[in-house]
Amino acid sequence: MQDIPVLTVDGPSGSGKGTIVQHVAQKLGWHLLDSGALYRLVAFGSQNNHLSFDDEASIADYAANLDVEFKLVGSDSAQPGMADAKELQIILEGQVVGPELRTETTGNAASIVAAMPAVREALLQRQRDFRQAPGLVADGRDMGTTIFPDAGAKIYLTASAEERAQRRYKQLKDKGISGNLAALLKDINERDERDSQRTASPLKPAEDAVIIDTSNLSIEQVVEQVLAICEQKF
């Protein structure tokens, strides 16, 4: 499996990872791994199964047996910013998971779950199993540092906390979910600190990652930069 190409895209919440990897995976025709969704799925499923966040062993066991599939569905689009681009569908235990996975409550719970060493260990091999031909685009916080340190190309996306809060606010509003901008900014700052200070795989760029600040860039501009890097590396 080591000869199967991998592109890792890491970065903090709201930096644009999810949108970018969907367009890049679609353009390349590669598989996609949304590792952040894995932690959200573990948090979401744990809550649904009434598991306590104080019971790390039980949550780790749930994570080790997580049945999930990522699919890009919809029509093909010639341009990365077009509305008819494929969308990511997340299937948990045979059922499509909707907007409930993207609420702030689930996001904060996912950050707590992601800080548990036993859970990270349980998901380690599960994530590496997504490496299948013809290639994989992996989105997360430690894809290039911990999960796929041998990846042929590594990207680290970043943006100001204020810009990321604005994006999150717009995303929630577009989905009909209420949000408070000040509260979102506070949550992002707290999550950044928690993710960067944790002992297990802290959020940081891989030493060989290309850092892209997306604060003042369009989706199309970022996708073009990433695809250009892929052309150089693969």
Image (tube, rainbow, N blue to C red):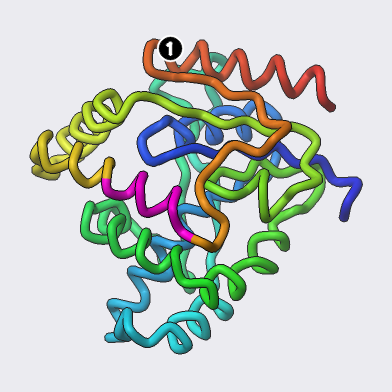
Range shown magenta: 190-198
Secondary structure at numbered mark 1: loop
Most distant residue in the right direction: 3
Relative to 47, is 21 above or below? above
In the rendered image, which quarter contains the C terminus?
Answer: top right
Measured as percent of width and height from the top left, residue 206 is found at: 66, 38
Where residue 67 sits, quadrant-wise, is bottom right
Point 53% across, 66% down: residue: 68
Measured as percent of width and height from the top left, residue 100 is found at: 26, 58
Point 69% across, 35% down: residue: 207
User: Does residue 66 appear in this view?
Assistant: no
Q: Main secondary structure of the magenta part?
A: helix
* Amino acid at dot 1: Leu
- For the residue pair 109 and 115, the one nearer the viewer reads as 115
Measured as percent of width and height from the top left, residue 221 is found at: 51, 11
Left/right placement of residue 70 relative to residue 208 reads left
Measured as percent of width and height from the top left, residue 180 is found at: 8, 39
User: Does residue 175 appear in this view?
Assistant: yes
Relative to 140, is 106 above or below? below
Residue on which disc 1 sits: 217
Relative to 67, is 8 above or below? above
Q: Is residue 195 magenta?
A: yes
